[in-house]
Structures are given as C-alpha cells and as structure tokens.
Image (tube, rainbow, N blue to C red):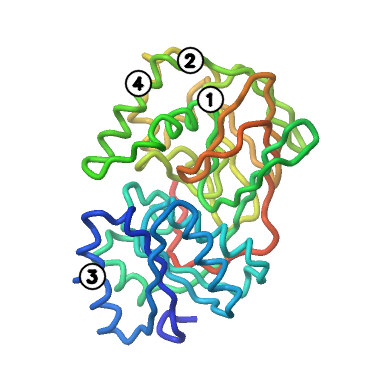
C-alpha cells in the first residue's frame, strides 16, 4: 500500500515540536498537499494525549496514522493503537521525525524531517513487531506499556529519570549528555537476573537494553543486531564496570561495536523476565515505567510501519 491511497490522521505533539513547529507548518504540510496526501491534523498537547488521540481515532474507524514528533510521540501513538482494541495488523503508521533523537527512525532509514515526505512517497509499509512490558509487584501486574524501539533498564532508565521532568527546549541533545555524565559517576550497579526460555543470567548489571530496534540515547547503536520484523528481541546487558571505562568506550557504543567487550552479554528471545531484589528503574522510548520486576513479551499482532530497514553489520 502506498501512502497516497487513503486519508491520513496526523498526530502532532506541539510540546515536542517547539521551534520545529514552523518546519511542520511551512514545509511538511505544504509538501503533503503538493503530493496529494489527504490528511487531518490533531494536536496532542499534553502527557498521555497522544495515547488518547490515537485510541479515539482507531475506535472511530481510522486505520492510517502519521506521527509528527519523536520517540516519545511514537510511543504514545503505538500505545493508543493497542489500547483501542482494534487489530493492529489493520493499522498503517508513518512518521515525520521532528523529535530530538528520532532513534526509532534511524533503524528504519528515515531522513531528516524536511525530506521525510519524499521518503514516505518512495517507500512502503512493513509488518513491524511491538513489545509490551508488564511491571510486576510480586505476582501482581501493576502497569503495562507497549514499545516499538528499545526498553532500557538500570543505568539507561536512571538517565531518563534524571531528564524526564526537565526536557529543555534548547540544546536538548547536549543536556541529555550532561545528565548522562552526572548519573554515570554516581550510579551503582544493581544485582539483576534475566530469565528467558533458554537461559538465566545473573550479574551486577550496569545497564540492560531490550531491543526491537537498534538505536536509543540520541544515536547510540545500543542493540546493533536488532531487526524490528523478526519476531524476537535482542537483549544487550552490560555488567558492572568502572565509569572511566564507560567514558573510554562511548565511541564504540555509538558505532555498535561495544558488544565485543568482555562485560557485554547478548541474548535473543521472544520473551524474558527481569528481576532484582532492589528497586530497578525501567523506561521505554523515554517514558518511565512503573518500578518493579518486569515481564517482557511480543505484543499480539504487528503494526504496518512505513520504513526502509536495511540490516547493517
């Protein structure tokens, strides 16, 4: 199916857009109209409003959505789709990457926003996996969150927790890196058990990434082997290591070469459990999870997401 074949519902987060809103209003919308793409725009102007908007649109019968924003906006729309109760395999999702990191879009080959409409015209939709994290208190489920990119735990989540209440309008990438360094030198590794159908792995963990796609943290290729359409997660865990060694290997993290380090352990599984005797923070696409132990699985059904995923070595 090509993007010109139906009416599209644009869901935009004006808080995520900030200065980029002008790009949306003067460039993106004009390009959509010039290429004959029919659309209606909906502004989701607060936390959780993207979920509510996507859920409402799906229940009203719409199945063709375009997210205008970054990873958090995409996450909200994905959660709205699944919470609506419609068959996700009937839903088609495209993206205009106007966020800060746009990490999910990196895996799917999206260009910068000003060229995104041309990209939408040139590429098609592919069935794409979606994960679901259930936060557990003992045997009781306390919250559930869907994700399409990466679920991060321990240090990854501690950095997000440091930034989540103060996302800046200016130089957000630089601020993120400053927060990362701040957390790095005070963070203590946590005892964690990762359990899959085939393996149980116990270590004092520095960080854990459960990857459906490859990038997070504004361009870090943390799970370089992840394929968003292969029906399984790739899990990259890094055991306790000195902060200075993290700093020394940041270049490897951006290139995806860190998986060769002796502290790194990789697992592949369709589901897993992450547990710890201590409180363990978790996040998905920059959204904090309810704290607890975690059960992670593939969500039923796959979304049709426009992109051009090419496996990289």
- Give residue 259's position: percent from left, percent from top: 49, 31
Q: Does 273 appear above or below 147?
A: above
Name the N-terminal-most of marks 3 and 4: 3
Q: At 31% from the left edge and 72% from the top edge, which residue is drawn?
A: 117
* Front in this rendered view, residue 227 or 67: 67
Residue that badge 1 annotates: 238
Residue that badge 2 annotates: 241
Q: At 26% from the left edge and 71% from the top edge, which residue is drawn?
A: 28
Residue that badge 3 annotates: 25
Name the N-terminal-most of marks 3 and 2: 3
Residue that badge 4 annotates: 182
Name the side, left or right, on which 141 lies relative to 71: right
Q: CA distance from mark 3 to mark 2?
A: 47 Å
Secondary structure beneath dot 3 equals helix
- Give residue 75's position: percent from left, percent from top: 50, 54
Q: At 36% from the left edge and 51% from the top edge, which residue is drawn?
A: 102
Q: CA distance from mark 3 to mark 4?
A: 37 Å
- Give residue 31's position: percent from left, percent from top: 25, 77
Name the N-terminal-most of marks 1 and 3: 3
Mark 3 near mark 4, Cβ–Cβ under 8 Å? no
* Front in this rendered view, residue 105 or 52: 52
Q: CA distance from mark 1 to mark 3?
A: 43 Å
Name the N-terminal-most of marks 4 and 1: 4
């Amino acid at each position: 199916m090509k993007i010109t074949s139906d009416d599209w519902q644009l869901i935009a987060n004006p808080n995520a857009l900030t200065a980029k809103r002008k790009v949306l209003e003067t460039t993106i919308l004009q390009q959509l109209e010039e290429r004959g793409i029919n659309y209606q725009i909906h502004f989701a102007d607060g936390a959780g409003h993207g979920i509510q908007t996507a859920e409402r649109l799906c229940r009203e019968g719409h199945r063709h959505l375009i997210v205008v924003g970054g990873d958090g906006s995409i996450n909200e729309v994905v959660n709205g789709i699944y919470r609506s109760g419609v068959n996700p395999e009937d839903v088609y999702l495209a993206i205009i990457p106007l966020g800060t990191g746009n990490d999910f879009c990196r895996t799917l080959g999206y260009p910068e926003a000003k060229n995104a409409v041309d990209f939408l015209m040139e590429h098609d939709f592919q069935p794409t996996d979606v994960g679901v994290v259930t936060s557990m208190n003992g045997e009781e489920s306390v919250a559930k969150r869907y994700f399409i990119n990466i679920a991060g735990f321990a240090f990854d989540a501690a950095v997000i927790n440091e930034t989540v209440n103060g996302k800046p309008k200016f130089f957000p990438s630089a601020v993120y890196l400053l927060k990362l360094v701040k957390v790095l030198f005070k963070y203590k590794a946590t005892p964690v058990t990762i359990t899959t159908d085939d393996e149980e792995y116990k270590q004092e963990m520095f960080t854990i990434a459960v990857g459906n796609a490859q990038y997070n943290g504004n361009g870090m290729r943390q799970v370089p082997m992840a394929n968003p359409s292969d029906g399984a997660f790739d899990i990259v865990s890094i055991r306790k290591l000195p902060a200075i060694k993290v700093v020394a290997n940041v270049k490897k993290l951006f290139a995806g070469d860190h998986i060769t380090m002796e502290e790194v352990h990789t697992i592949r599984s369709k589901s897993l459990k992450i547990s710890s005797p201590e409180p363990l923070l978790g996040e998905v696409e920059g959204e904090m999870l309810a704290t607890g132990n975690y059960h992670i699985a593939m969500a039923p059904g796959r979304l049709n997401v426009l992109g051009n995923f090419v496996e990289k070595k």
